[in-house]
Amino acid sequence: EGVGVQEYTALKLKVKEWSDSAKKILQGKLPDGANAYFIPATLRPETMYGQTCCFVGPTIEYGVFKVSETEYYVCSPRAARNMSFQPGTFPEWGVFPQVATFKGKDVIGTIINAPLSIHTAGVRILPMETVKDTKGTAVVTCVPSDSPDDYATVLDLAKKAEYYGIKKEWVDFGKEDFGIIPIIETPSYGNLTAKFLVEELKIQSPKDTKKLEEAKEKAYKEGFYKGKMIYGEFTGKKVEDAKTLVRNQLIESGDAFAYAE
Ligand code: A2H
């Protein structure tokens, strides 16, 4: 970390309905007809079919940034600043005005549209205590089939829904399988890599940092270099190839943009 450039895909998750606290904070701050988007940064765009929610850090500070007359982005102030100075991404070069500020906990329960996700009715913004506000956008889209961190967090949220102040159905969709679908088949870990590794390494909670680090490494190597797509338009292709294809498709449809830091 800290060496070289991380090439993220920044996804645009359009807000369908704000949480009650967010509505209060945003009153009169977004013009009629404008759209707001949560902007998670991901290294695995080919997994976006499997998004089941989107995470923010409950105690992290976020801003709502005016990117154009009609588009407002939600992310960390640090990321908004970086983005606004990225050549070629936005028509205007300069800092995006910050129109509102809130803590992650204020937006829990907000419903957003996740591009390509099987959950077409929308997914929820949920808390993840291990989100760092020093990298990416401090918004993390949740793909529990392929990210051990995401899988461990989803299990924990469902187990302690009341403690986290969320409804259990927001995280498990009222189903035993948590609305998780297989997207990538791997030779060693089957088609739900994150679940396999969390169980094999006996990871008990999202705070099992060391084991999760190991799981993350294994999942990435196996998934990226040996995985094959078993869902979506690029079914049958190698993950290595599908990554660029899905990324380009998301960028072309206006649902994502390149973000490097
Ligand atoms: B990845 P790197 Cl399916 N705090 O996206 C904590 N985690 C963050 C973050 C932040 N501020 N910003 C991004 N991330 C996560 C998908 C995914 C990711 C899958 C599998 C592995 C995986 C769905 N979540 O990442 O430290 C994001 O989660 C494992 C490396 O910048 C992002 O990609 O290298 C990844 O970590 C960026 O990690």
Image: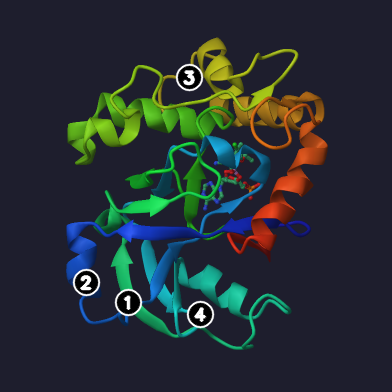
Q: For the point 54% across and 86% down, which residue is it?
A: 95
How packed is label 2: few (under 14 Cα within 10 Å), some, or many (20 or more)? some
**Disc 2 residue type (three-letter):** Ile
Q: Which residue is mark 3?
A: 203
Amino acid, disc 3: Ile
Q: Quadrant of residue 123?
A: top left
Q: Which mark is residue 181?
A: none
Q: Residues within 10 Å of mark 4 (few under 14, many from 20)?
A: many
Residue type at tag 1: Ala
According to the picture, the residue beneath numbered tag 4 turns out to be 67
Residue under label 2, please give it: 25
Q: Are marks 2 and 1 in contact (CB under 8 Å)?
A: yes
Tell me the CA gap for discs 2 and 4: 19 Å
Query: Circle 1 sits on which residue?
Result: 100
Separation (CA) of disc 4 from disc 3:
40 Å
Ranked by sequence position, the earlier of labels 2 and 1 is: 2
